[in-house]
Amino acid sequence: MGKSRDLSEFERGMIVGARRAGCSIAETVNLLGFSKTAVSRVYREWCAKQKTSSHRESCGRKRLVDESGERTMERVVEENNHATSVQIQALYNSSGQEKAISLTTTRRTLKRLGYSRMSQRRDTLVQAGLDALSAATSCAEQLEDQQRL
């Protein structure tokens, strides 16, 4: 069976609240839609430790580009909006950040920030559609004006 996402604090609180209100495990599962294992594990943990958090966010390797690094990268991209990812990487690494990042990390961060080639293509398509729409409406208005004369 596959691993699903962690339950949020709110969802864990709902499980504990339902069980404390007297619902059985099966009733809690039917009411909230979580698995029996998740319901029993969360409630057992709460009974033993009086806590419901998982603290999974502090696990794993820390990101090379943290929040301040993301702001720096956004500033670099906004100042050089026609730069390639190689140029953005060089500008980011020369901006005084603690650790230099690779081209792969640069591309991953740009994608996470919403800068991707697909979104640029989509924007040009949307712009072309808007241009065509405005041209069509202006042509229709000109025809109406000519018919009135």
Image (cartoon, rainbow, N blue to C red):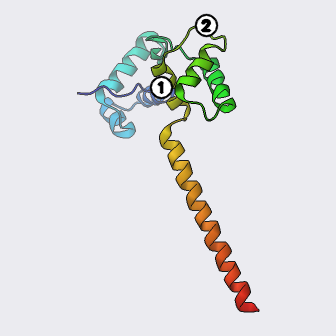
- The residue lying toward the viewer, choosing from 98 and 19, is 98
In the rendered image, the quadrant that contains the C terminus is bottom right
Label 1: state its secondary structure.
helix
Q: Nearer the viewer, residue 60 or 49?
A: 60
Query: In the image, residue 48 lies at what x, y percent?
Result: 41, 10
- State the residue position of label 1: 108
Helix or strand or loop: what does disc 2 sit on? loop
Who's the residue at 55% across and 35% down the image?
115
Q: Quadrant of the N terminus?
A: top left
Task: Say which of 107 and 44 sits in front.
Answer: 107
Residue tagged by mark 2? Answer: 98
Q: Position of residue 87 (x, y in %)?
A: 57, 24
**Residue type at tag 1:** Arg
**Mark 2 belongs to which amino acid?**
Glu
Q: Is residue 67 left or right of residue 48?
A: right
Q: Residue furthest right?
A: 149
> What residue is drawn where x is 73% and y is 85%?
145
The image shows residue 31 at horizontal and vertical percentages of 38, 39
